[in-house]
Image (cartoon, helix red, strand yellow):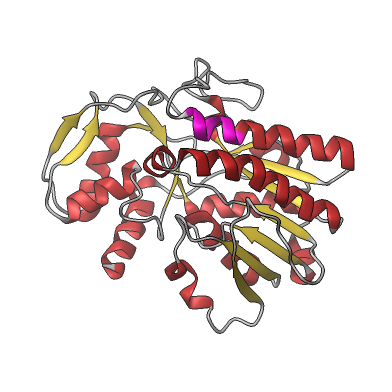
Amino acid sequence: MGGTRLAHARVVVTGAAGFLGSHLTDALLSAGAEVVGIDNLLTGSLDNLAHLTREDRFRLLEHDVTGHIEVEGRVDLVLHAASPASPVDYLQLPIQTLKVGSLGTHNALGLAKDNRAAFLLFSTSEVYGDPDVHPQPETYRGNVDPVGPRGVYDEAKRFAEALTFAYHRTHGVPVHVVRIFNTYGPRMRMEDGRAVPNFVRQALAGEPLAVHGDGQQTRSLCYVDDLIAGMLAVLEHGVRGPINLGSRHEVTITQLADAVMDAVGVHPGIVHVDRPVDDPEVRCPDTSLARELLGWEAHMTLAEGLERTVAWYRRAA
């Protein structure tokens, strides 16, 4: 379901007040869809949706999706984005994270099933854990510690994927699963805890940037506009997945810190701090499938993406 079909679709977006959920809501409205957002505002913010106050084709239901979901009227598509997504959040909210990945996914799939609607799951590169295959293709089954502190997020998403495919096989629900790699951009909370907002906050304050470990661990960072374009392409082409969406441009955390300082225009230096438990050594997607099936890849350079992100943080301050 994509392109002109979205212009006539009524779409439910769980986690609509979050970083990615709000950007996707904007894209769906731009495509002509009607959007019903659902969010309990645990980690989302009404500020992300404030510009939609007078938009007739959008309404927000403040509701916890771990409880039964009821939406009046027809539903053509359910996009399940609800979940704490940063390590700071899911380490502070471990049980809520597991519940939204299990009960929340179950309820969102039930809504899709009852309305004969399609379903798209926001999954994550964290299903690969601390990978021993690099870059990570969709066929890689992962290296996850189910009882480690990060397991609450990793296993919640792995369970969500399994449940999504069970609903497809058992009930015939049309499903799509996207595995989202590190994404950044406007609307990420300054206190989010992930590298980009942490570094931007510290640089804007003139503080040294706190780099975990020796800073040689790598990430690949996708600007949010590129990611949303990939999601719409998944719907347009009807790709079931799982499919990786992310940037192939891999940088060390030290290189990322340097790039943020360049974008902010100050260079307060770096301090090294202890690395979190189970912090992945590498993270980079194999996006061959996305290029082959969707004709999609991330285009925004890190320098330009960071420039746009820093400009937004300055305006939002």
Q: Which residues are magenta?
A: 151-157
Name the residue: 39% across, 41% down: 92
Left/right of residue 237 with respect to residue 92 in the rendered view: right
Specify whether residue 135 is in view: yes
Name the residue: 54% across, 47% down: 83
The spot of residue 246 in percent (x, y) is 53, 40
Left/right of residue 49 with respect to residue 70 in the rendered view: left
Name the residue: 32% across, 28% down: 276
The spot of residue 141 in percent (x, y) is 62, 20
Note whether 75 is above or below 95 in the view shown: below
Q: Name which quarter of the figure residue 311 lies in.
A: bottom left
Note whether 119 is above or below 52 in the view shown: above
Residue sticking out furthest to the top: 132
Note whether 247 is above or below 262 in the view shown: above
- Does the magenta stretch mainly form a helix, a strand or a loop? helix
Specify whether residue 287 is in view: no
